[in-house]
Amino acid sequence: MSPPPSGATPESGSPVPLGALVPLTRPGWTEAGRQLLAGLELGVDEVNAGGGIGGRPLELLVRDTAADPGRAEAAVEELARLGVAAVAGEYHSVVARAAANRAEALGVPFLCSSAVLDALTDQPARWVARLAPAQSYGWRIYADFLLARGHRRIAVARQASLYWETGTRVLRDHLGQRGGSVTAMDADALTPGELCDALAEGGATALLLLAGTPEPAVPLVRAVRADRRLDGVLIGAPAGQPEFPGWLAALGADGAGVPFLRYLPARPGPPAVRVGEALRARLGEEPSFVAYEGWDTVAVLAEALRTYGTGRADVVRAWEGGAVVGTRGEIRFSRLPGIGVRQWAWPPVQVADRDPAEPGRFRVLHQD
């Protein structure tokens, strides 16, 4: 389809197109992509079942980013040509950053569902907003959890990425101000055995997995669990790898007791319970926080389209005021200091893990 001419009134009953960026193939984190897409699709289906946007159905135009920034930029350009009212989604922070900068340049609203990198755009942006908490906020909460548990000598097994490097810096700054230290080890250059040797020699009491899954995170967890020298070392994964079913399938009981950041309330309200049941039926497994982020994304955009109109500038107006009730509480956007995009200021943040006594269940260890 071609975008309508500027100022034209869309045909009554014609779909309102929304673009969706989702990692659905490798090297993208496909488990996260599938969960994100399930939330987005459920949200659209429910909006349409309720009459759509003034009688017009939402139409979701899905593009697979495969964790490739270049593909994300090309997808934003294509979706802009197709006349979408807004672009939504994406999980990988570096990919979301590329999409956000392109959307800002084109004047297309982009509501990022899951990426947390603080610097989501090069400059303060008008056309970009985000639901997930900024990395500096969530990862400081994780650092506070480590300190509360007595961990001050921290090692990180890190792959090369702006996201992992930024996370390391957040942890190092926050822990360093409180008497802690962070030592980075190269997860790409060292084998799991070599990482275990370095960990044993360094004396850290916690190892954080700043690396992808299944490789190299899963082999590293197996190696640490099997190394008796490291019996007292906490394994942590602030980026949320243990949230997804593939983690448990790959590691079984070895995957329990690995604390990670999770963006869900301690006590879900009625909207979360209802949406959770629908997501569970759709996915055939327990929904992750990423699936809820997808549903909340559509809830925000649908309310914007109903209230302000279906033009691109109308969507942006919704981010400048008002609030939407999502699955995880009231969503209201603001500009936090140092963050160049409109941000859901205080989403819920937990530190959770899989229960060692019953790895199929989660337990909350720390709540913001």
Image (tube, helix red, strand yellow):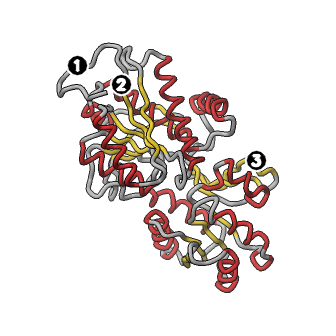
Give the SS element for disc 2: strand
Number of the front mark, 2 or 3? 2
Amino acid type of disc 3? Gly
Q: Which residue is mark 3?
A: 360
Residue at 43% x, 42% y is: 21
Q: Residue 27 location in percent, x, y? A: 53, 55
Q: Residues within 10 Å of mark 1 (few under 14, many from 20)?
A: few
Which quarter of the picture shows residue 198? Answer: bottom right
Residue 180 seen in the current view: no
Which quarter of the picture shows residue 223? Answer: bottom right
Amino acid type of disc 2? Val
Q: Which residue is mark 2?
A: 16
Q: Earlier in the sequence, mark 3 or mark 1?
A: 1
Q: Is residue 44 left or right of residue 310?
A: right
Residue 190 seen in the current view: yes
Q: Which mark, by number, is residue 64?
A: none
The answer for how far apart the CA atoms under marks 2 and 3 are is 40 Å
Q: Residue 76 location in percent, x, y? A: 34, 43
Q: Residue 109 location in percent, x, y? A: 31, 39
Quarter in which the N terminus is drawn: top left
Residues at discs 3 and 1 in contact (Cβ within 8 Å): no
Q: Which residue is mark 1?
A: 9
Residue at 48% x, 75% y is: 177
Task: Please name whichever residue, 329 or 89, is drawn nearer the observer in this view of the structure.
Answer: 89
Amino acid type of disc 1? Thr
Residue at 40% x, 51% y is: 96
Task: Please name whichever residue, 36 or 179, is drawn nearer the observer in this view of the structure.
Answer: 36
